[in-house]
Image (cartoon, rainbow, N blue to C red):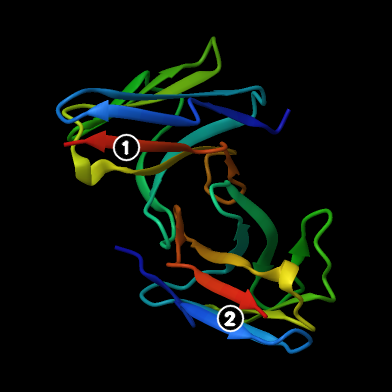
Amino acid sequence: QQQVKQSPQSLIVQKGGISIINCAYENTAFDYFPWYQQFPGKGPALLIAIRPDVSEKKEGRFTISFNKSAKQFSLHIMDSQPGDSATYFCAASPSGSARQLTFGSGTQLTVLP
Amino acid sequence: GAVVSQHPSRVICKSGTSVKIECRSLDFQATTMFWYRQFPKKSLMLMATSNEGSKATYEQGVEKDKFLINHASLTLSTLTVTSAHPEDSSFYICSAARDEQYFGPGTRLTVT
C-alpha cells in the first residue's frame, strides 16, 4: 500500500514534443505529490509539487495533473528540450509534509535534438 | 532557496575501513534529515531518518551498527559506513526537511 508505481521506465521524445510520465498510488493517506529531476551523479531536485485540493498545477513548461478518484498523477513537460534529459521521480507523502516520501521507480527521459 | 551540501562528493576506501559522509543544511535549520542509498538506474531507497539530538530511525533491513548516523546539530548529520565492503559501494544522498525535502548532491562511495 506504500508503493508508488511509475511508468514508463524510459521515454524518448523529440525536441519540442510533450513528455508524459505517469504515477499511481494506493495509500489514500498520501496528500502531497512532488516530482524530482535528477541528473547523472547529482542529487534529486524538486521540480514541481501538488496537493490534492487542485487537479492541475503549472509552472513554466511543467504541469502536474492530479486525479484523486483514480489515485493517479502525471507530469507533462511541454516543448521538451535536450536539457530536460534526466531521470524523473514521482513521490508521495502523507499528512501534507515532505517528511516521509515514497518514491516511484523513476523514468529516464531522453530528448533528442 | 534551501541548500544542502554533502562532503565528500566522492570517496574511495579500502575494504575494512570506515568512511564518514557529512550532510549540512547551509541556510536553514533542519530538525530532520534523511539518508538515502541509490543504486545505478534505480530509485532512492530510504536508509534512515535522523532527528537532531536523538537516535536515528532505521528502515527495515538497514544495519544500524554498520551505518552509524549522528545528528549533533540542526545543520549537520553524518553517516559513517563502518567496516566497509565492496557491496557498500553506492551513491549516498542526504536530504534536510523544512517545508520540503531538500536533497544534497550525493556522495559516490567506492570500496575496493
Mark whose residue sits in front, 2 or 1 = 1
Q: Which residue is mark 2?
A: B21
Q: Is residue B19 left or right of residue A45?
A: right
Relative image position of residue B88 (x, y in whole percent): 71, 69
Taking A96 as reference, is A9 above or below it? above
Tell me, for residue A51, which label it has, or none: none
Answer left or right for B75 relative to A63: right
Q: Residue at coordinates 77% horizontally, 82% vertically from top-left? A: B82
Q: Position of residue A41 (x, y in %)?
A: 43, 62
Q: Residues within 10 Å of mark 2 (few under 14, many from 20)?
A: many
Mark 2 → mark 1, Cα distance in angstroms = 32 Å
**Chain name for mark 1:** A
Q: Name the residue located 48 percent from the left edge and 25 percent from the top edge.
A: A8
For disc 1, the marked residue is A110
Callout 1: SS: strand
Disc 2 with disc 1 on a shared chain: no
Residue B30 lies, with reference to residue A30, above or below; the image says: below
Residue drawn at x 17%, y 35% is A60
